Image (spheres, rainbow, N blue to C red):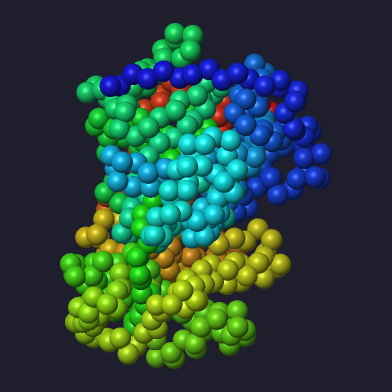
Amino acid sequence: MHEVSSRAVAAADFNSVRRVEGFAAIREAYPAYLTDESKFSCKPFDFLFFPRHEAELCAVLQEMGRRGIGVTIAAARTGLVGGCVPPGGALVSLEGFDRVTKIAWDEWAGEWRLRAESAVSLRTIARQLAEKRFPDLERSADARIREAFVSFRQDPQSFFYPPDPTEMSASLGGTVATNASGARTFRYGPTRAWVRGIRVMLADGEVLDLARGKVFASPAGEFLIRDSHGRDRRVRLPSYRIPPTKNTAGFFTAPAMDLVDLFIGSEGAFGIITEVTVGLLPRTPKISVVQFLSSDEQAIRLVRALREDPRLRLDFLEMYSEAALGLLRERQARDARSVGTPPIPQRARSALFFELDFDPAAGPAAKEALAEVLASCGTSPADSWAAYEPRELERLKHFRHILPETINAIIAERKKKHPGLHKLGTDLAVPDEHLETMWDFYRESLARAELEWVAFGHIGNNHLHINILPRDMADLEKALDLYGRFAEQAVAFGGTVSAEHGIGKLKAKFLKAMYREEEIEQMRAVKRALDPQGLLNPGNLFETSPCALPGRP
């Protein structure tokens, strides 16, 4: 089936929706809403809305549509590409959409599924799953929801939500809108792989309630969406090919694809996700390892060996370059407690951080397999840290996340002398066969440019974050030029200009490095079919909006 109907929502009284009007009042009372983690600057906007439910959200969209005012959507504001930063018009915060609404067993799929509103954070989901305490469900007025939750609590196993975007304060809806991914993508795939259904409000306030496996594209690559007035929206999918890597650049498309997938990773370009259903997995014992190595090149060799050995099932595979370890050593020397680990070995010039299944009762097979792989690359378990107990696992996880904090502190200090300075962090990924070549291109280009840099991140997916730390504005100009060349090379290798952070406003110019103009026009056509006024999230993805940007520029 490729046809589906949207449903009307009874709009609330627009005047009852909590709001702040006037940019001066917004800036004074709510300065945090002017940007996201990218620190990209907004343009003056006139309205900040706080709807509590779909009826109020519908009222806002319909009124803004009547006035021709663009609407930018925000929740946790943890994005890194300026996606929730208004270019004018109105900002709608979904922070009031913060309830877990259901946990139930799906008999056909054989899994527990959790349904939550879009602003529920990943941290909240992880904590409540670990404790099996969900206050929203315990006090639900629906007896069936309470009964299903009781069954979940009685299940002797512990469960978790597999996607692992780095920022646990991110909202569930935001991670779906960007198809967010992180370390555990190496084993479990990105957010898309775990979304079982979504509820999404279109620009005119009508709602689609979509379950995966129900609505697929026609053989001609089309969906037909009929609204409550009998009017049809015909959506034709883009014909480009998605790269065989982690990817969050552009709209997803595939033959006979599920309509759910059109909205995942669309960055809110044509629909606002209000509720999400996700699959859960049983939690199994793990061991985390930080393996110290003699060089970055040895680390690259070990990555390939770990990936290719069928005996090892790694959840994630991360890298710290020589310069990254150097920064962490310096931090340990200044404040060892903030790092929270033993001293980094002085002989270590690189490191890999990985996690794998580990059951002591199952015998030594996994341990022996790991030792063999390490030996084949000239190292051993003696050159590692390992953690099995929950407290030690958390210490290594903290070690993984402290590096970006350290880098940001360096840039903040340099900004005192050069206010326009900022770091540049790549978000590129390439297919497996180009990992070594891309690494060499990074290293040689940065050496020629005489720029300071560190590399870390998701090397298991060939997705390293090369962080360039400019010392002055001349360095920044060289870094910006180099970033463009890195993006072009990643695309030439069949990769992507954005592996996990999306395009937003900051990376719109790089879309042209990856897609031809006619392919970008196909994306615009999808936007026009579902949002003909260009009302939703104007300025995201495209350097110029597919329609005139509504609202004040």
Whether residue 83 sits left or right of residue 373 in the image: it is right
Whether residue 309 is visible, yes or no, is yes
Percent of width and height locating residue 23: 77, 37
The answer to whether 485 is drawn above or below residue 376 in the figure is: above
How many marks do you count on the picture?
A: 0
Percent of width and height locating residue 381: 30, 86
Name the quadrant containing residue 20: top right
Percent of width and height locating residue 552: 68, 28
| Residue in the image at 59% along x and 49% along y | 135
Is 505 in front, or is 114?
Answer: 114
Whether residue 335 sits left or right of residue 454 in the image: it is right
Name the quadrant containing residue 287: bottom left
| Residue in the image at 49% along x and 60% along y | 130
| Residue in the image at 29% along x and 74% along y | 359
The answer to whether 528 is drawn above or below residue 292 in the figure is: above
Q: Quadrant of the C terminus?
A: top right
Percent of width and height locating residue 178: 46, 44
Is 103 in front, or is 250?
Answer: 103
Q: Quadrant of the N terminus?
A: top left
Whether residue 370 sits left or right of residue 120 in the image: it is left
Is 16 in front, or is 400?
Answer: 16
The answer to whether 14 is drawn above or below residue 265 in the figure is: above
| Residue in the image at 50% along x and 65% along y | 468
Whether residue 503 is visible, yes or no, is no
